[in-house]
Amino acid sequence: MFTKLLVANRGEIAVRIIRACKEMGILTVAVFSEADREALHVSLADESYCIGPAAAKDSYLNMEAILSVALGCGAQAIHPGYGLLSENARFAALCESCGLAFVGPSPKVISLMGDKDEARRTMAEAGVPVTPGSGLIQDQAQLLEEAARIGFPLLVKARAGGGGRGIRLVQEEEGLLEAYAAAAQEAKAAFGDGEVYLEKYLKPVKHIEVQLLCDKKGNVRCLPERECSLQRRNQKLVEESPSPAVDEALRARLMEASRKAALACGYEGAGTVEYLLDKDGNFYFMEMNTRLQVEHPVTETVTGLDLVKWQIRIAAGLSLDFSQEEVQLLGHAIECRINAENPLRNFLPSCGRISLLHIPGGPMVRFDTALYQDYVVPPYYDSMIGKLIVGAKTREEAVRKMQAALCELVIEGVEHTGEMHMELLALPEFLSGSYTTDTLQAHPELLG
């Protein structure tokens, strides 16, 4: 096992990783920008080093600075968290070349799954259902030809990146050229890759994902599915496990497809296979996330497994010590992402000093955050400031527990989305479990 690990991230996920390492007896190294000198992860780590100015490109995305710190302080491994460098194949390769263990899959797998077009082909060859679509679009003539073949509505999607960027919905041919140009431009700006492809737009659908743990011996474990269908502009707002739309038979099919996906690409570590599920119970591969997910606590709550610890163990060469049959589904869990945004002002980001903070408590209530009293939320990074997670025996109990926890959550000094989540959980579609990825389009009043 590693004796010292560097956390190449910030915020609540950096705190989460540091806490896992402390429980494992591993010394931790934090890196931080000048804007994060007073951040919680900096004070929790055993060592901490400033790696640059506030802008992420000059600090948390500065590979050379991060690697220099790791080598200089004697770290043996780097955990990238999620976002930032977590799915950067070049960074993973640089870690390897420096003799540092990258807590994640190999650079080859990251590159393969990061290329959405190549990932689709790999999954199709492995027998995993994929959404009807096209290859990479080379010119306008091919664009029109493939669109006519697939049919409208369709999606123009970037082959790189994620987070809902580089995606445009096209209802009819008239808006195709504009959507193609916009998606390519956004993808180029966000990911440095403007290549796009077309995909059939399935509606209504649910967004279902299966968590994987895969060791270096070829052992694959599929954990109970999560549902992430309550979304705004392709950004997840609420996640739960298990999905109210998935029965035992469908769960078995999803897990078998996910096992094939993992074996097809030689996956190692924690990863997630994401699917679209239609009203007839058919599911289609959407993408594979080669990192820890924001919603990993939902799976931890219903399985009793610590995914961060298992990531570190696998990176250190340890094998999974439980069988697929031993994976249990323990009740129901829900997560609400709390962002420093104002829903009444088109989700305008908010920053400032936390003047009052009260975190909900009670059995099976968890708030993953890097906030503390008088902490100043900076304006430079992602707006998520916490994740509220609850677990209960049944979905109905979990919903009530989340509603109670949201009522108890107090964050003053910044605007946040806590109250909005109360309204989301009260939606008839959510309570019945029938909600889909476009449910919130029918409720614009909730989204400012």
Image (tube, rainbow, N blue to C red):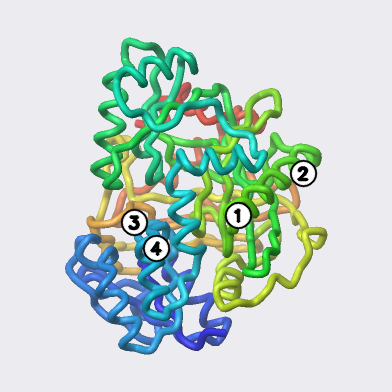
Measuring from the top left, give residue 347's x and y in whole percent: 31, 39
Q: Which residue is mark 1?
A: 298
Q: Which residue is mark 3?
A: 412
Q: Amino acid at mark 1?
A: Val
Position of residue 79 relative to residue 420, above or below, is below
Callout 4 secondary element? strand
Task: Find residue 252 and name its label.
Answer: 2
For the point 38% across and 89% down, which residue is it? 74
Give me the C-alpha separation between circle 1 and circle 4: 23 Å
Give me the C-alpha separation between circle 4 and circle 2: 42 Å
* Mark 4–mark 3 CB contact (< 8 Å): yes
Callout 1 secondary element? helix
Measuring from the top left, give residue 333's x and y in whole percent: 64, 51
Q: Residues within 10 Å of mark 1 (few under 14, many from 20)?
A: many
Measuring from the top left, give residue 46's x and y in whole percent: 40, 86
User: Closer to the observer: label 1 or label 3?
Assistant: 1
Q: Amino acid at mark 4?
A: Leu
Q: Who comes first in sequence, dot 1 or dot 2? A: 2
- Count the labels in the image: 4
Q: Who comes first in sequence, dot 2 or dot 3? A: 2
Can residue 371 be seen here? Answer: no
* Mark 1–mark 3 CB contact (< 8 Å): no
Q: Who comes first in sequence, dot 1 or dot 4? A: 1
